[in-house]
Amino acid sequence: MSAKSDALEQAVMDWIAARTASDAEPTPRRRAQADRAFARLAACAAPRIRYFIRRYGLSSAYEDGEQACAIALHRAAQSYDPRRAAFTTHMNWQIRAELQALRHRLHGDQRRAPHRLAAETLSLGDPAILDRLVDPDAELAVEGRASDYLAGRLADRLADDWAQRRDGEWQRGKAKLAAQHSLVRRHLTAVDPAGRLSESHRHIVRRAFADIALRIDA
């Protein structure tokens, strides 16, 4: 992991330790220590939060975006299991889900129009050339795309395994099972799939997710 990811990992572990101590001994001092630990975690996550707010086109609603990200950060810290994933990956998923939901509420999930690009000739003798060429958001962008790719691969595997377990139940109707497989796969990575589904499709998705969860826990 990078130094920034390491700092986030240490910050969330410090907050978990402070929260555990506060739960065991709910005194004002312990609660203040937990609050300070979360403030340090939020400071470490601030560059990623700014990046994702810009990426989701919510700069005009920056305060709302910050509040959504704070909720996502707190939820991610509460549910974090270091045995399953790095905190950066776990946090990114939560932030993206909250911002996508916010964008949908504010703009109907409209995508930003493509930016106009302008060409510029740069002199290699310019001492500030490297500063102008370095993209400070490159690491976050790469991690975001990597998490999307890994999420897609995992969703493919979960949906395939679910369909294979159901294959024995069907003597006929392979096309129907294939359609259900596509439905489940599509909503494994959707933020709020149930709100746009018919009742029969919601039933299929709920049963599939429950079956997948049981297999994962086992």
Image (cartoon, grey):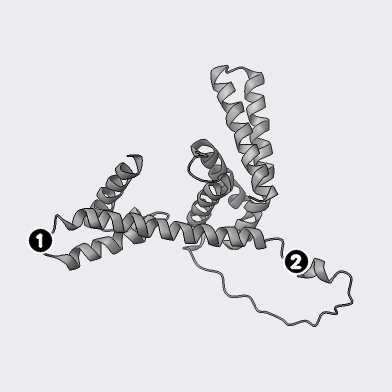
Give the vertical position of 132 relative to 104 (above or below): below
Q: Is residue 120 above or below residue 66?
A: below
Please say whether residue 142 is visible from this viewpoint. Answer: yes
Residue tagged 1: 171
Residue 189 visible to the viewer: no
Which residue in the protein does label 2 denote?
Answer: 134
Tell which tag, 1 or 2, sits nearer the viewer.
1
Label 1 neighbour load within 10 Å: few <14, some 14-19, many 20+: few
> Mark 1 is on which residue type?
Gln
Residue at 35% of width from left, 40% of height from top? Answer: 217
Q: Nearer the viewer, residue 44 or 125?
A: 125
Q: Is residue 26 left or right of residue 32?
A: left
Percent across and percent down for residue 180 are 24, 61
Total numbered badges shown on the rendered structure = 2
Identified at 60% across, 62% down, the residue is 142
Q: CA distance from mark 1 to mark 2?
A: 58 Å
